[in-house]
Image (cartoon, rainbow, N blue to C red):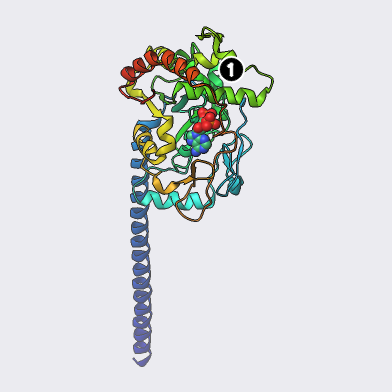
Amino acid sequence: MLKECNILRRYKCRRNIFIMYGVTISVCFFMYMLGLLVLSNVTSGDTLIRSNNVRTLQTSYDADDVVGSDDIDISKKLNSGIITSDTSEPKTKTNNYDKQGTIFLDDEDIVKKKKSRTRGLNIDNRNKTKRLPQALIIGVKKAGTRALLEYLRLHRDVRAPGPEPHFFDKNYNKGLNWYRNLMPETSKGQLTIEKTPSYFVTKGIPEKVYKMSKKTKLIVVFRDPVTRALSDYTQLVSRNPNVKSFEEMAFVNNRTKIIDTSWTIVKIGVYAQHLARWLEYFPIRQMHFVSGENLIKNPAGEMKRIQEFLGLEQYITADNFTFNQTKGFPCYKKETKNSGWHCLNEEKGRRHPGIDNSVRKRLEDFYRPFNIKLYSMTGQDFGWP
Ligand code: A3P
């Protein structure tokens, strides 16, 4: 009887142990499942934010996935520090660029972009790839195109090659893949842009750009054509000091003051004629016109309009600019804090040769009707004499 009783107790005891194990395992399993559930919610929420963001920008930037460079004008290095400078890559951040002037994200940028995702911005760091430009700065030579490109590169959603690709005018036969290969890698939602000022004045280019993508956004910087001609001439002299005087080049006959309209430097300034060729292919709303003069006086104001036109977040502000009295031009910095100022190099902002007032007046009279036509085509009065 006693034996039976012990057996019974042992049996009960084992049963209790089994029940205890069972309960513990069930609780653990339940908590594990709960953990999984919480995790999956968090991940899917994140994905949702990201995919929404990507979609937002895809509409504005996915350049048609288009049809779609070279490096004639190797861009110059930027110096950090207030006064000196140059045309493209900041030396302080050389790790951000490859030999082609491609910008790579550094750790700081990546952290920033992760933060931006949580603020509902449109960056997807995965799937980075080279894309054809969705926007082009097509001109005008000596009007401030380098300054504009460098200012745009301050934007975290903009990537651009430093050198001028000259694809549509000099390297078209190399094909769109060659062109695409010159572009820096971008994530979806980032804008690829390049600048080659000769595009604006070269015949046949509007059609080629249209064939690449009819959605391409076009930016043109204009500058008083007389000053622009002097600037272009200054560059010519710097490369070939034996060139004739400005007057000898600009006039067929210096005595009669008949303008030599076959001189390229004069021809470039007849903006209305060049613009007309672009308007055969692109609607005016797809073009944006920048006052080169105002880009110097009020870079932040011009950049505000440009960011709007490109559908970009207003990221570049007055905090990115300072007017450098020594250089006589704006200088800029990438971040609003903790980075040095960059200025364009000494080839930008050069002194022009003095010309007689009568020569200037003659050129102004020549350009005036074309300027007036340009104002009416663009709906913008650039205020040139
Ligand atoms: P100048 O050198 O004649 O003054 P581009 O880059 O298209 O070749 O244009 C050069 C012109 O950009 C310069 O012509 C200068 O006037 C103008 N520019 C505009 N912003 C500038 C800046 N921040 N620094 C230097 N030059 C600037």
Of the pair 166 and 351, the residue shown nearer to us: 351
Mark 1: secondary structure: helix
Q: At which x and y percent is residue 240?
A: 67, 22
* Vertical arrangement, residue 217 with respect to residue 328, above or below: above
Outermost residue toward the right in this view: 242
Please give the residue where the numbered disc 1 appears in the rendered image: 170
Q: At which x and y percent is residue 361?
A: 45, 18
* Vertical arrangement, residue 166 with respect to residue 113, above or below: above
Whether residue 317 sits left or right of residue 78 in the image: it is left
Specify the amino acid type for callout 1. Lys
Of the pair 257 and 285, the residue shown nearer to us: 257
* Vertical arrangement, residue 281 with respect to residue 53, above or below: above
Whether residue 21 sits left or right of residue 201 in the image: it is left
Q: At which x and y percent is residue 131?
A: 49, 30
Picture quadrant where residue 353 is located: top right
Q: Residue at x 55, y 42 (%)?
A: 104
Number of other residues with Cα within 10 Å of mark 1, as a class: few under 14, some 14 to 19, many 20 or more? some
Number of marks drawn = 1
